[in-house]
Amino acid sequence: MNVIVEREKSLEALQKRIEDLRARSARQNVDGFDDMRVLEQKYTELQRDMFGRLSPWERVNMARHPKRPIASDYIAQFDRFDELHGDRHFRDDPALIGGFAKLRGRRAMVLAQQKGRDTKENIRRNFGMVAPEGYRKAKRLIELAARFTLPIVSLVDTSGADPGIGSEERAQSEAIASCLLALSTARVPIVATIVGEGGSGGALAIALADYVIMLEHSVYSVASPEGCAAILWGDAGRAEEAAAHLKLTSDDLVGFGIVDEIVEEPLGGAHRDPERFVGRVLAAVEAALGRLERLSPDDLLAARREKYRRIGAWRSGVEHLAAAAP
Amino acid sequence: MPMPEWLRIRRDEAAPADAAMWVKCPSCGELLYRKDLEANLSVCVRCGHHFRMHAYDRINMLVDRDFVEVGTDILPGDPLAWSDRRSYREKLESDREKSHLSEAVVTGFSTIGGFPVALGVMDFGFRGGTMGTVVGERITHLFEEATRRRLPCVVVTASGGARMEEGMLALMQMAKTTLAVAAHRDERIPYLAVLTDPTTGGVSASFAFQADILIAEARAAIGFAGRRVIEQTIRQKLPDNFQTAEFLLEKGHVDMVVARQQLRDSIVRVLDYLVDGRGAARALKAVPELALQ
């Protein structure tokens, strides 16, 4: 069960009591004003306590919140989106959508990991876990974008690449490795936004970018906390502990120089005010594209190389980075 | 073949005093005399099982004679200040003692069949061959040097994937190495990857599968997700040959599967098609350090 959803339920109960009290005092014409003010104050305090400072594990839950804006919520606020399907070899992967888009008049190629809103859609979209044909579609669209000089906007939201038998049979490793190569040589601006979960190589496959934006409560990690706990301790149940170790929050990653910008979320998370929030994220994407478009393709590629070249140097460098982290 | 000087120096440190004289083959159960096994490139004489190899033994098996190691000054820190049952620093220290390696990859220059090459060899014995910042940095440095000197790259992979204890800094090495491979590729210099047991996760999904030519060592386990992860996900047992080199060949993922005894020859044959110019003169021009050995 999602710990954030649990908390929201307990808050809802309190809110309901406040409403009941208000209704009763109005009906009976008695003065319940003091009680009500106390309760309302308590409600505000509780809300701040619950959501003001989130632990890494709470952020993992926020990133997986069933109401958190998903890729389609962002795409809905583009001026236009024309989806392009398929890897031209095997099938169209519904876990990764891509296509032409206009963002406030600017042409772009969008690549996005798409989770579902409900169980049925999640099953169809494989919970946003992309198969090799999804990464091959992404690679095709990256190359298309580079040929016709469309900047690339990617929206990252996956617990990891699909680990099924079929994905292994169709060379998941090669698909991700080739997608990374395509992004590293595309002579157009690339802006990646971690909108929910950024899980492992499956996330990075579309997140190697010139500029990386992360939502305040999104998480981005070397493996999902469950995967990490299973790998290190043979027990996926110790995910909360793994989350505390992994340094997967937006603050951590800005400290490491991996993320360039954090978009702050409303108290309680992005889903409390989704429309406006998505607009703010897209404004940040648009601003980043504007800055990157001023660079020549050569400078852009040199800067991209330099950005990743600096991440994780040897001993002295690494300790320097650790010291810079919060 | 006499033991070359570069290896003798390391072997003196590396010879484990407590190594058992007899080794049991995990595949057929045959008891093998350690010296015979080593003389047979750590392949079981009875069933052909390929034992995992120490990076220096692998290098010795591949190179003509000399090997100039680079990147030894690139050493691990503890960027996340990680500690679970043991601290990350302790884990590194005990693996250093156990493996006689400073990290999970050895990089350097040498010649193979007279072709000067940049050579990287991973070792599963150090943190399961996982890629953290040091593996990423050494591989990146190797590709940069290879690009600058116009040398083909040969990388022998063995890895459980990204190193958990270095978190996102480890994951980012996939991007960093990719950018270095891309630059090498742009110059049209060949890159051969030799996938050995096991090659998975962040290494297989980055520089390993980006090679021009993919050679899988016989019987090696190669894939993206680990076998256990898949079995847990689908809740059924996988067939025995799943994710083996032979399975990958059948599915079309690798160029060739080669037994260890033929590996060196196969590399030389491929280099012969892709590179013009071999011999001492070219080697010394590309790697003047070889003269100092």
Image: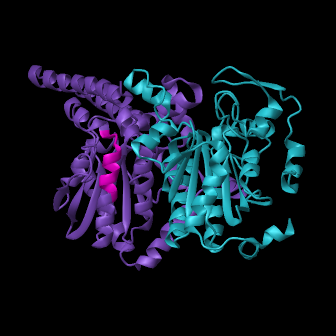
Chain colours: A purple, B cyan
Q: Residue A142 versus residue A22: which sits nearer the camera?
A: A142
> Can you give x and y, in whole percent of width and height, for residue B238 in the image?
43, 25
Q: Is residue A37 in the magenta section?
A: no
> Can you give x and y, in whole percent of width and height, for residue B23 in the image?
76, 25
**In percent of the image, x 70 and y 40: which residue is there?**
B53
Q: Is residue A134 in the magenta section?
A: yes
In the rendered structure, the answer to whether residue B207 lies left or right of residue A84 reads right
**In percent of the image, x 68 and y 34: which residue is there?**
B51
In the rendered structure, the answer to whether residue B173 lies left or right of residue A205 reads right
In the rendered structure, the answer to whether residue A106 lies left or right of residue A167 reads left
Q: Is residue A61 above or below residue A296?
A: above
Q: Quadrant of residue A178?
A: bottom left
Q: Quadrant of the C terminus of chain B?
A: bottom right
The answer to whether one can see residue A45 in this image is no
Q: Quadrant of residue B248?
A: top left
**Bounds of the magenta span?**
A128-139
Q: Quadrant of residue B163?
A: top right
Q: Residue A152 versus residue A283: which sits nearer the camera?
A: A152
Specify the principal SS of the magenta part: helix
The answer to whether one can see residue B24 in this image is yes
